[in-house]
Image: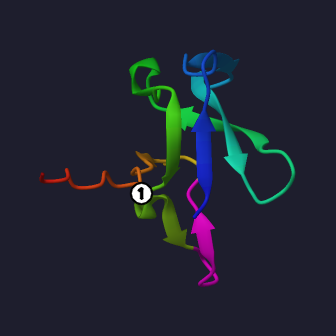
């Protein structure tokens, strides 16, 4: 599972002017197994689509089969889903 972190200060959307208009994105960090996470940009359709601070993983809908039957990440439709907390609370003890 690829973990993506959005940290405080990077949860706000940013914009960049392009020839076709304005491009919105959000900074995040991808934990790819190395010593340090890699900084990445998450494309956004609108600034209101920005993700809040937290841990995420890629949704399966982000992937597509390419022209040569290769598995690809669709760079224009990056959807994240929150990482579920795997630690479960212990049941209360009955006296």
Provide residue 37's location: percent of width, then percent of height: 78, 45
**Residue at point 63%, 21% (across, down):** 10
Q: Residue furthest left?
A: 95
Q: How is the image coloured?
A: rainbow
Provide residue 32's location: percent of width, then percent of height: 75, 57
Q: Would you say the magenta stretch is mainly helix, strand or loop?
A: loop
Question: Would you place residue 4 above or below residue 17 in this image?
Answer: below
Q: Residue furthest front?
A: 95
Q: Residue furthest right?
A: 35
In this view, the residue in front, 93 or 62, is 93
Provide residue 11's location: percent of width, then percent of height: 55, 21
Q: How many marks?
A: 1
Q: Secondary structure at mark 1?
A: loop
**Residue at point 46%, 26% (across, down):** 52
Provide residue 5's location: percent of width, then percent of height: 61, 39
**Residue 92 belongs to the span the image colors magenta:** no
Question: Would you place residue 64 above or below residue 92 in this image?
Answer: below
**Residue 73 belongs to the span the image colors magenta:** yes
Q: Quarter of the image for the N terminus: give it.
A: bottom right
In the rendered image, which residue does mark 1 sit on?
A: 86
Label 1 neighbour load within 10 Å: few <14, some 14-19, many 20+: few
**Residue at point 41%, 61% (across, down):** 61
**Residue at point 64%, 83% (across, down):** 68
Question: Would you place residue 58 above or below residue 42 in this image?
Answer: below
Question: Would you place residue 77 above or below residue 22 in this image?
Answer: below
92 left or right, relative to 39? left
17 left or right, relative to 60? right
In this view, the residue in front, 61 or 17, is 61
Q: Point out the stretch of residues depicted in magenta.
A: 66-74
């Amino acid at each position: 599972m690829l973990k993506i972190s959005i940290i405080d200060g990077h949860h706000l959307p940013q914009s960049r002017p392009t020839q076709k208009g304005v491009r919105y994105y959000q900074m995040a960090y991808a934990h790819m197994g190395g010593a340090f996470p890699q900084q990445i940009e998450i494309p956004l359709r609108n600034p209101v689509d920005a993700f809040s601070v937290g841990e995420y993983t890629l949704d399966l809908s982000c992937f597509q089969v390419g022209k040569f039957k290769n598995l690809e990440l669709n760079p224009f439709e990056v959807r994240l889903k929150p990482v579920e907390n795997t630690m479960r609370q212990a049941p209360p003890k009955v006296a």
